[in-house]
Amino acid sequence: MKAAYLTQTGGPEVIQYGELKDPIVSENQVLIRVHAASVNPIDTYVRSGLIAAELPSKYCPGCDAAGTIEAVGENVNNLQVGDRVWCTNQGLLGRQGTFAEKIAIDSQWCFPLPDSVSFQDAAANALVAVTAHLGLFREAKLQAGETILVIGGTGGVGSMVVQMAKAIGARVIATAGSASKCERVIELGADVAINYHGQSIEEVTKAEAPKGVNVFWETRRQPDFDMAISVLSERGRMVLMAGRDARPEFPVGPFYVKECSLHGFVMFKATPVEMRAAAEDINRWMQKGTLKSNIGATFPLEQAAEAHRLQEQSTLEGKGALTGKIIVTMG
C-alpha cells in the first residue's frame, strides 16, 4: 500500500511517500481502506519531536481517518466488511497513524459513518469535534440558554465549539482575526463576532453579556486569565486545551470570589465509552447538517509533507491565511 511515513522526527521534510506492507488485523481490530485523513496541530508536534513519543520504526502520522472496512477481527461483532466508518485518536500513545491507504485500528476507536456524510467531512470533523464535545459537555456542562465566548471561532476546534453550542441552544460570542473570518463565524452560527485585530474582546463581550459569559473557551497558546475571569459570570467555567509551555499570571482572588472553575483536558485521554458518546452526537448532527466541516485546504497523500508544512506555518508561526482543517485524500 501507499503511505506517508517517517523514520526519524524532524521538520516536514522527514515525511516520505512510498510503499509499506499492508497492516495485519488482530482479533479486536478492523482494516479500513482510507479515503480521507486530516492534519491536526498535535500531528506536527509528534512528527517534529516536540512531543516525545515512542513511534513505530516506520511511523505514519495522523489521528483522523474515514473510509470503508475491508476486514474485521474475529472478536469484532459490531462492525462488518463494507461499513462506512470514521476514527480518531490514532498515531498517539504507540498507535500507528492514518496517513496510509489502509489502517488497522482497534474497533473501540471506530465509529459508523452516515451515508449522507462524505469521507472528507468526517475526517475533517473527527478529532476536533470529539475535542469540542468533551470540553463543552463532559467538562463545562454547557446548557441551553447559557452564553459562551469562543476564542478563535473559525479554527479547527473553535468552529466545532461554535456549532455544537448553537445546536444545543446556547448563545455564542466568537472571535476571529479578519472581517472575512468574522463573516465565516456568523455563518457557522455565532450570534456575535469580534474582530480581535480591531476590537477589544473584553469590551465587546461585556457589552454583549453584561452579567458575564457562562463558559470561556480558550484556544490560544498563551491564555489571558485576567481578561477571561473579568468576562466570566458567577460560577463561570473556563476551558483550556492549548498552551503546553505557557506560564501566565493568574488572578486568584477574582477567580475564587466568583466561584469560577478551570477545566484543562486532552481528547486522547478520553475513554472509549466517552469517545463513543461524543461520536453518537457528532454523527447525528452531521447527518442533520447541523455540524458542518470547515475545510481550508486539501492535498493528495503524496503531498503529506506540504500539508504538514502548511499546518505548522499556521499553528506555530502564525503565517498564512488558513481557515479551517487540512484534508489529505487517498487515490
Image: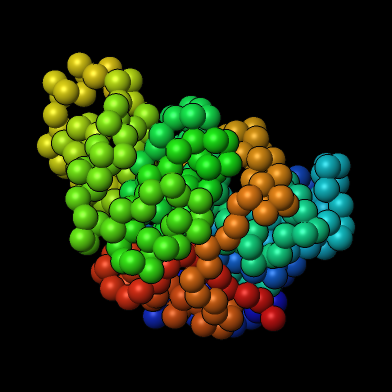
Say if 149 sits above or below 309 in the image.
Answer: above
Residue 301: horizontal and vertical position, in percent?
A: 58, 78
Say if 38 sits above or below 222 in the image.
Answer: below
Say if 328 sits above or below 271 in the image.
Answer: below
Quarter the C terminus occupies: bottom right
Residue 139: horizontal and vertical position, in percent?
A: 45, 30
Q: Is residue 311 visible?
A: no
Residue 172: horizontal and vertical position, in percent?
A: 43, 42
Residue at 64% from the left image edge and 67% from the top image edge: 120
Q: Foreground residue, 101 or 26?
A: 101
Say if 314 sits above or below 137 in the image.
Answer: below
Relative to 287, 294 lies left or right: left
Residue 92: horizontal and vertical position, in percent?
A: 50, 52
Residue at 15% from the left image edge and 41% from the top image edge: 248
Residue at 46% from the left image edge and 75% from the top image edge: 307
- Number of disc labels: 0
Q: Foreground residue, 127 or 271?
A: 127
Q: Is residue 38 visible?
A: yes
